[in-house]
Image (cartoon, helix red, strand yellow):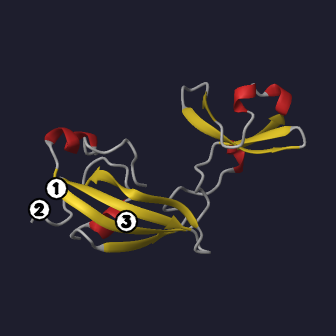
Amino acid sequence: MSDTVQRGRAVYITYVITDDAGQVLEQYAMPVGYVHGGRSGLFDRIEAALAGRRVGDRVEVRLAAAEAFGPHRPELTFTDELENVPPEHRAVGSEVEFESERGERRVFRVTRIEGGRLTVDGNHPLAGKDLTFRLRVEAIRPATAEEIASGMPADTPLQRPH
């Protein structure tokens, strides 16, 4: 049964994420891998939809915002005067990591620069959006013990599908 997606298999997929209007928000044409049934970080409904599939199979899964990256939290968006921001972060798309008093870390992205003010957002870029994931199984193979423990195939970049 190693030719199907199942627990303990390294699975390689390509995918496209679209919003409700059909706009492509993210796309991976090069296969990314995960270990099925492991600690991959893949959304449960997506992993469940891939179970039992074979190479070449396509799967479509729609996730409401609450099931995906959660609601957009306005309290994670901050605006400040541009002059208060280090020059290396004065570009839309720039990322900076902040740590709270409790030691929690969060990455904030510069999302807007306008009128001498800069806005950063600590929400995931897809937070607050209902999403459709279109996935294609590209390859399947047995995972090693190390791969099962990590949730990631050793021969894939450290990109995790959502």
Q: Nearer the viewer, mark 3 or mark 2?
A: 2
Report helix, strand or loop for mark 3.
Answer: helix
Please name the residue that numbered disc 1 is placed on: 141
Please name the residue that numbered disc 2 is placed on: 2
Q: Position of residue 70 (x, y in %)?
A: 56, 56
Q: Are marks 3 and 1 in contact (CB under 8 Å)?
A: no
Q: Amino acid at mark 1?
A: Arg
In the picture, measured across the screen, residue 156 lies left or right of residue 98, that is left
Q: Are marks 1 and 2 in contact (CB under 8 Å)?
A: yes
Kindly report the distance in space between the C-alpha atoms of the residues bearing marks 3 and 2. 21 Å
Q: Quadrant of the N terminus?
A: bottom left
Q: Residue at x 82, y 35 (%)?
A: 80
Q: Quadrant of the C terminus?
A: bottom left
Q: Residue at x 80, y 39 (%)?
A: 118
User: 24 above or below 124?
Assistant: below
Q: Nearer the viewer, mark 3 or mark 1?
A: 1
Q: Determine if residue 36 is in view.
A: no
Please name the residue that numbered disc 3 is placed on: 45
Number of other residues with Cα within 10 Å of mark 3, as a class: few under 14, some 14 to 19, many 20 or more: few
Identify the mark at residue 122; answer none if there is no mark.
Answer: none
Number of other residues with Cα within 10 Å of mark 1, as a class: few under 14, some 14 to 19, many 20 or more: some
Kindly report the distance in space between the C-alpha atoms of the residues bearing marks 1 and 2. 7 Å
Report helix, strand or loop for mark 1.
Answer: strand
Q: Position of residue 101 (x, y in %)?
A: 61, 24
Q: Amino acid at mark 3?
A: Arg
User: 90 above or below 103?
Assistant: below
Q: Position of residue 91 (x, y in %)?
A: 72, 38
Q: Position of residue 106 (x, y in %)?
A: 57, 36
